[in-house]
Each structure stands twice: as C-alpha cells, then as structure tokens.
Image (cartoon, rainbow, N blue to C red):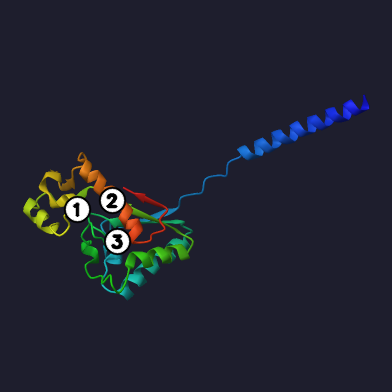
Amino acid sequence: MKSFSINYLLIVLLISMSKSILEYNDVKEPPQDFRAVWSSPWGGDEDLIRFNSIDEFKNNMIYILDTLKMYNMNAFIYHVRTHNDALYKSDLNPVSPYFTKVDFTQFDPLGWLIDETHKRGIEFHAWMNPYRIASDDTIYIETLLEKYKNYPENPASKKEYILYGVKTIIMDPGKEEVREFISKTIIFSKLNKRINIISIYK
C-alpha cells in the first residue's frame, strides 16, 4: 500500500510537471515594437537623399540614422524605387534622377547605408513602388519609350504594357510579364546588392 501511494504521488507529480512544461512552451514572446521612420526623396526628403557628393550623402544619412538611434527607433524604411527606377545600380531599371551623380564604380550608396543602419542595431527595410512610372500623365508615350530603350527587359520599354491614368502613368499590373518583371527586380536587387534586408514593401 505504501509503495502504491508513493507511485501514485510520483505519477501525479510527473503529470503536473508535464502540464507546467506544456503551458510554458505555449507562452509566446510578446511581439517586438515596430518603431520605424520612412524616408523618401519623393516624400519630402529630397534635399537629404539626393546625391551630390559622397561626403554630403554620408553626412545627411548619418544625421538621419543618428536621429533614429536617439529616438530609439528600430527600423529604417528607405525608398529604393520610386518611379520604375532604382536608387542603386541596376541592369533592369534606369538609375533614379536623384542618383544620377553617383559613380557606382567608386561608391555604393545603398550598400554603405545598409551597413551604417545595421551598425546602429536598426533594421533596414526597402520600399519599392512596383508599377508607377511617372506622376504626370502629360508625358508622351514616345518620351517614355525613349527613356527605357536601353532596358529591353523593362516593360516600360513597350507601349502595350503602359497605362495612363489621372496624373499618373503605370505599368499594367494585369500583365503577367509586368508581374514577373517586378519579382525579378526584387530578386536581383537583393542578389546584386548582397542586401541583408528584413523585408521589402511594394
């Protein structure tokens, strides 16, 4: 009888411990706060982001990143594609008008910016507008085709993939070729830039 009582108590103890372990494992860590700042040359930060020289660009970006760190931000959302172009070196998209003065053989602005962001313990998030070509519907189709003639893989080089709207021109999202191109742009931007990106927004 004594042996039975001890065994019974051991079984109860094991069940109790198992329940506690299961309950512990079910406890989820609270989600991390997403304290972010979005920066875009098209959204009001043109003077800070437009590239004129390496030193000026670095100083401007360090000012932004140090400000983020001071206010305990943990994510930096940077606009890398505003109008079917690229704020980085790309074989698929023309360079952004904001980065025309960049000599990519001498300096990699986006690569440097990502490194500086991570040095401060801040996540880097890339923002891409997928379909927008222009924010002006008065641009002639011939002008657009001329702009993209050296980028034959870019759908904006063919008029059948271009749609005009009210104060906007976009690539037709209903075309499979356009959607495949956007995916390719994202993939190649990550591979070519060795970008350790947390996420990409479209």
Q: CA distance from mark 3 to mark 2?
A: 28 Å
Q: Are marks 1 and 2 in contact (CB under 8 Å)?
A: yes
Q: Are marks 3 and 2 in contact (CB under 8 Å)?
A: no
Is residue 39 something that shows in the picture? no
Residue 90 spot, x, y in % from top left: 26, 60
Label disc, if present, on residue 45 of the rendered structure? 3
Is residue 146 something that shows in the picture? yes
The total number of labels drawn is 3
Name above or below for residue 129 compared with residue 97. Answer: above
Residue 61 spot, x, y in % from top left: 36, 67
Which of the 4 image quadrants contains residue 175? top left
Name the residue rendered at 18%, 47% in the picture: 170
User: What residue does disc 1 label?
Assistant: 153
User: What residue does disc 2 label?
Assistant: 184
Viewer-proximal residue among 144 and 56: 144
Name the residue rendered at 16%, 55% in the picture: 152
Counting other residues with Cα less than 10 Å from the Cα at mark 2, is it few (<14), some (14-19), or many (20 or more)?
few
Viewer-proximal residue among 46 and 152: 152
Name the residue rendered at 46%, 50% in the picture: 34
Q: Amino acid at mark 3?
A: Asp
Element marked by disc 1: loop
Counting other residues with Cα less than 10 Å from the Cα at mark 3, is it few (<14), some (14-19), or many (20 or more)?
few
Q: Is 61 situated left or right of 22 in this image?
A: left
Q: Amino acid at mark 2?
A: Lys
Q: Amino acid at mark 1?
A: Glu
Q: Is 172 situated left or right of 35 in this image?
A: left
Which of the 4 image quadrants contains residue 163? top left
Counting other residues with Cα less than 10 Å from the Cα at mark 1, is it few (<14), some (14-19), or many (20 or more)?
some
Viewer-proximal residue among 115 and 72: 115
Q: Of the two numbered discs 1 and 3 on the same chain, state the one appearing first in sequence.
A: 3
